[in-house]
Structures are given as C-alpha cells and as structure tokens.
Image: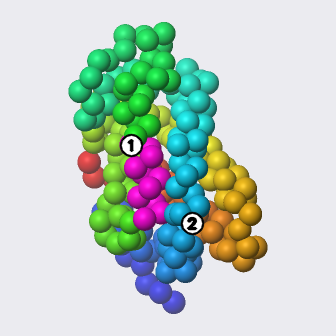
Amino acid sequence: MILVNEKQLDTDVRYRFQYLAEFMGFGEKDIAAIHGAAPVLAPLVPSLVDAVYDKLHTYDATWRHFLPRQSGYEGAIPKNYDELTLDHEMIRYRKEHLARYLAALVTKPYDGKMVEFLDMVGKMHTPKAGSKELNVPLIQMNALLGFVADALTNSILGLNLERAVEVATLRAFGKLLWLQNDLINRHYLDSVPA
C-alpha cells in the first residue's frame, strides 16, 4: 500500500499533482500522446479559442467576468456589455492567453514549472492572483472546462488519426483535463493557501 501525506496534498501543489497523476495513470505515454498531437491540433487552436469565447459570450453569468480589468491588460476597459464585444481589445488579449495556454499543454514539458503554471490557471480566476476584481464562480469554471474538454474531444475525433493514436490522445487529454480541473477546484476551498 502506498502511503500518502494527505496534509501535504493541500500545501504542496507538485506533490498533489504527482499523486493525482500517479493515481489516474497519467504518465510519459500520455505526455507523448499530447505532445504528438501538437502538429495536428495547432492549426485548430484559433477556431477552438473562438468557439470558447462564442460560448462564454452566450451567457451573462460567464460574460460578466470579462468586464473588470484583466491582470496584465493595459488598454481600454469596457463600461458595459454593449462595449464588450467579441472583437474588443481586452477580449483579444484574453483570447491570446487561451491560445498560449493550449499551446503550452501540447508543447511544454510536464515538470514542476508546468504544474505551477496549471495551478496558476485556477488561481488567477480568483482574487488570490491576478486581478483582485476577478472572482469567477466555480460553477462557471466547471462549465468552461467541460466545454473545452468536449471541444478538444470533438477536435481530436475530427483528425482521422489512426485508431490507437486517437484512443491514446483522447485518454491523455481526458486525464490532463481532470488534473487541470483539480488544480482549478482547489483554489475554491477555504484551506488552500493564498
């Protein structure tokens, strides 16, 4: 039986990731499948990013979180929903972030730095990091990640990969998105250090 330091799971993000990855069976073969998908998924990133933002724009409960200034954004701030169009410079800025995130998933090594990056993705949607005005409710984060998971699955299925490669790629991304989901959800718990 493998011993787990449960207190360390809450305080050490690398230990947490390692435990979850090991438990789910996310390993080198999965990382190779994700990295191997980069050349065929890269051309789809712009349309995937647009699909995500089209979906976010569909609901006031998600779109309202783009009204406050985003961390790192220095341009004009929209005053209301009418000004916050899909082609507003702040939305273009956010789209660039999502595109870089997706690129990082398929190109970067899954080392400690990547674990901290994935953890920051969760943290930056709360007042604990980035903009103090930004506090996206967990339900909206779950909705977003669920949409992204389905869109990625649909994209992978549309690539007409060899069946074994397709299965490995789908399973790898499935595990990765569960890991990302945990690193988002943990920042909505009271016990997580700021």
Disc nearest the viewer among 2 and 1: 2
Query: Which residue corresponds to the image point at 25% horizontal and 35% vertical from the top-left?
Result: 72
Write down the region rendered in magenta.
97-107
In the rendered structure, which disc, 2 or 1, sits on the residue that comes first in sequence?
Answer: 2
On the image, the x and y values in percent for residue 154 come to: 70, 52
Q: Which numbered tag is attached to residue 37?
A: 2
| Residue beneath the point at 38% across and 71% down | 109
Q: Is residue 26 magenta?
A: no
Q: Which mark is residue 121?
A: none
Residue 25 position (above or below residue 176):
below
Q: Residues within 10 Å of mark 2 (few under 14, many from 20)?
A: some
Considering the whole magenta stretch, tell me its main secondary structure. helix
User: Residue placed at 50% from the left, 69% from the top?
Assistant: 35
Which residue is nearer to you in this view: 47 or 176?
Answer: 47
Given contact means CB atoms under 8 Å apart, are the residues at marks 2 and 1 in contact?
Answer: no
Asked if residue 105 is among those painted magenta in the image, a careful observer would answer: yes
Residues 169 and 26: in front is: 169
Q: Is residue 58 above or below residue 37?
A: above
* Viewer-nearest residue: 186 or 31: 31
Q: Position of residue 133 (x, y in %)?
A: 31, 27
Dot 2 falls on a residue whose secondary structure is: loop
Q: Is residue 151 above or below residue 64?
A: below
The foreground one among 33 and 177 is 33
The residue carrying pointer 1 sits among few (fewer than 14), some (14 to 19) or many (20 or more) residues within 10 Å by Cα, namely few
Residue 42 point in image, percent of width and height? 52, 55
Residue 37 in picture, x, y percent from top left: 57, 66
Is residue 63 visible to the viewer in this orientation of the structure? yes
Left or right, residue 72 beside residue 60:
left
According to the picture, the residue beneath numbered tag 1 turns out to be 97
The reply to whether residue 188 is visible in this rendering is: no
